[in-house]
Amino acid sequence: MPKNWKEELFFTGMMAGLMVLGMTTYNIVKTDGWSVHVFREVIAGYPLGLLVAVLLDLLLVGPLVKTVVFKFIITDPAHTNPARIGVTISVLMVLGMVTCMSLFGLIMSAGTPTNWGIAYLSTWILNLIVALPLQLLVVGPVSRMGLRKLQQQTA
């Protein structure tokens, strides 16, 4: 876990950067199919998606998730397995970020759905199916490894 603001920014940047890259690529391929243009579209949409994701993570979803986790789910973090804390936070962060970023993606997409409710629900479910394993199996471990390396360098 990050121990100071510098580590928090580094960890959030890695986590959000990799998740936005993965989910942007997934959503473009899901919508337009796989082609050489996917890379151009990913690069074009990446900066704004990353900015929105980082702001949501730092200002809304992250603080809300940490409050819920440490107030209602894990009331004694000193005597709780750190892996349990990490997985709990990761799962709730994915739920919160998928909820927000699915709406962002729908708003930013060129087409306007006729039925926003169905389009949002469908987008949310499909994004959750991809985002949860991406976070738990790839992005989370890679980001934690990067954070550990940073903490070892500054120790």
Image (spheres, helix red, strand yellow):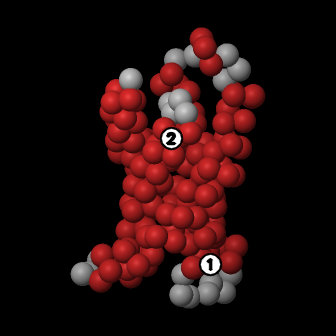
Q: For the C terminus, give its image quadrant.
A: top left
For the residues labelled 1 and 2, the Cα–Cα distance comes to 32 Å
What residue is rendered at 53% in x and 87% in y? 110
Q: Position of residue 118 (x, y in %)?
A: 65, 73
According to the picture, the residue beneath numbered tag 1 turns out to be 107
Q: Do the residues labelled 1 and 2 touch (CB within 8 Å)?
A: no
Q: Dot 2: within a 10 Å radius of its alpha carbon, few (fewer than 14), some, or many (20 or more) residues?
A: few
According to the picture, the residue beneath numbered tag 2 turns out to be 6
Within the image, what quadrant is residue 42 found in?
Answer: bottom left
Disc marking residue 11: none
What residue is rendered at 62% in x and 19% in y? 77
Indicate the amino acid at tag 1. Ile
Q: Is mark 1 on a helix, strand or loop?
A: helix
**Which sits earlier in the primary sequence, circle 1 or circle 2?**
2
In front here: 3 or 115?
3
Within the image, what quadrant is residue 38 found in?
Answer: bottom left
Vertical placement of residue 66 versus 99, above or below = above
Question: Does residue 148 show up?
Answer: no
Indicate the amino acid at tag 2. Lys
